Amino acid sequence: MKPIVQVRDLTRIFGDSCGRCLEHVDETTNICPVCGSVVACGGVSFDLYPDEVLGVVGESGSGKSTLVRLLHFDWEATGGAVYYNLQAAGSYGAVNALELSPFLKRQIRNTSLGIVYQNPQDGLRMNVTAGGNVAERLLTAGWRNVGNMRARSAMLLQRTEIPVSRMDEPPRNFSGGMQQRVQIAKALSNSPAVLLLDEVTTGLDLSVQARVLDLIRSLQRELHVSMIVVSHDLGVIRSLTSRTMVMKHGRIVEAGLTDQILEDPQHRYTQLLVSSQL
Amino acid sequence: MLGEWAAAEKPTGGYNFAYIDEGTKREIRRSILKAIAVPGYQVPFGSREMPIARGWGTGGLQITLSIIGPGDVLKVIDQGCDDSVNAVNIKKFIDRVTGVAMTTETKDATIIQTRHRIPEQPMTDRQVLVLQVPLPEPLRHVEPLEAETRRMHGEGDYGLMWLSLYENIALHGEITIGAGYPLLVNRRYIMSPSPIPRWDCPKLHMAETLCLFGSGRERRIYAVPPHTIVEPLEFEDHRFRVENFESKACSRCGSANETYLDEITDDDGHKFYTCSDTSNCERRCRQ
């Protein structure tokens, strides 16, 4: 099977890089001793296959969110390559998507990617109605029928358990859990091939967490969307993903089947992570 | 060139013909040419100090003064009216610095400078329409940053604009923009047509006449060349509509739904309507 996303040596360095930062940092630090730049994401390579759920786990500051934001073109990468083998956007499997024009990047994003941020403020326009938030991607993808867009928004909001009667209210009127579910509805609006979930359940109380996880699982089963699930919570990783990468200081230190990583961690850091679970 | 100006009938009060010096005129004309070459794109230009305040038509005025010649016939209107203060002042000024012939007849004019209206009578390819623009940026109410709106225009990233129209429909049942309805020019740039009523927007589509837009305060010139596709932003199930004047009629010429009407309330509180385009109204009265 052909991977849907291929990532090769993806790197993001903050600060004036001396050009050889990657050689100077290792698993013990992500600050270059020569120039002081921070290697938020260093030489990350992996494949994501269709219908697969890939977990990314690591402590805060390990580069998990940076990775997701690079894949979503929110931030510019310093180096590396990303290949998207997508149907809807025309396949960019042979081209490094990071080198495409802003217009083509946005086209990939609008037609094939969905993202849910940890903080609903990052993913939603708080002054625009919930329905409008869901419709935004459809509008950028060229939908020009208000009735059809409202029908699709209503369907997705219903699916994510937001009362349709509240679709013309702005999300700032909603609770944190509801905002997160509006974000999920928004991320699904364009039927993405790849869904990026960045700490979706962090900050939600336990019963709401469970419902959001249930929702994501059932959506995955129904829509067969490939997902990258970023979390520092091993419980979330265990319940959602089949394969996991462990990140520390911007590097992948261990990768493999989720069960294998959680039951028989090989790397020192992973062992620490698993054993410090409450 | 100077010889031509010397042949002007009246002296221009010690100023260069048409007030602006020739070098500046050339610079403004270059911006106009660029604007015509890229329909709907806002070309920055070095807006000069004028003897009227910025925001009172200096953009339109600078365009008019840099394209006018001694043989031109000028008409100036303000909200459709030939005799309102802004129009009269601009006319007096241009008369003093050029001495060109003035008219109120749309068909006799070669240059028509206007604020917030397009004349009702169809215009020809022998005429130029110059519009005064207070706010040239159609995306300003969805994005406050100039750098960002320029990027959005450059990349054709108009999702936010469409979202604001969607929100309008979701919350109010229709698009509530009255004057200055956003238009897509040449299937590329979204443009603000200056605050003309929706009634006037279809006149820009495939027009015979060159339309130049000048914003002196914001230092932008843009254009809709003749025979350019100009489409209002609309949804398949919420079409663009012009103002409806059915069951209303002009109290002077009796025009009903043929011209754009102004609503006027008299001292006794009675409402009545008159044509906004006064010279067209008089023409209809004469007929």
Image: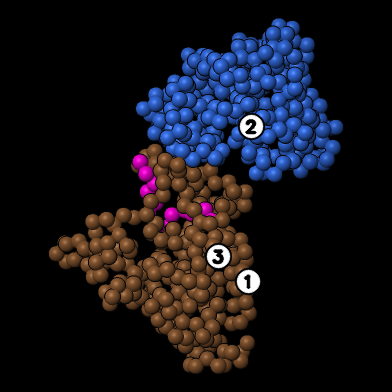
Magenta segment, which residues?
B173-185
Amino acid found under the numbered disc labelled 3? Pro
Which label is found at residue A88?
Answer: 2
Residue B251 sits above or below residue A148 on the image? below
**Residue B44 point in image, percent of width and height:** 59, 64
Q: Which chain is blue?
A: A
Alpha-carbon span between mark 2 and mark 1: 43 Å
Q: Mainly helix, strand or loop, the magenta region?
A: loop
Alpha-carbon span between mark 3 and mark 2: 37 Å
Q: Nearer the viewer, mark 2 or mark 1?
A: 2
Q: Is residue A69 visible?
A: no
Disc 3 target residue:
B225
Q: Quadrant of the C terminus of chain A?
A: top right
Disc 1 target residue:
B30
Q: Residues within 10 Å of mark 1 (few under 14, many from 20)?
A: some
Alpha-carbon span between mark 3 and mark 1: 15 Å
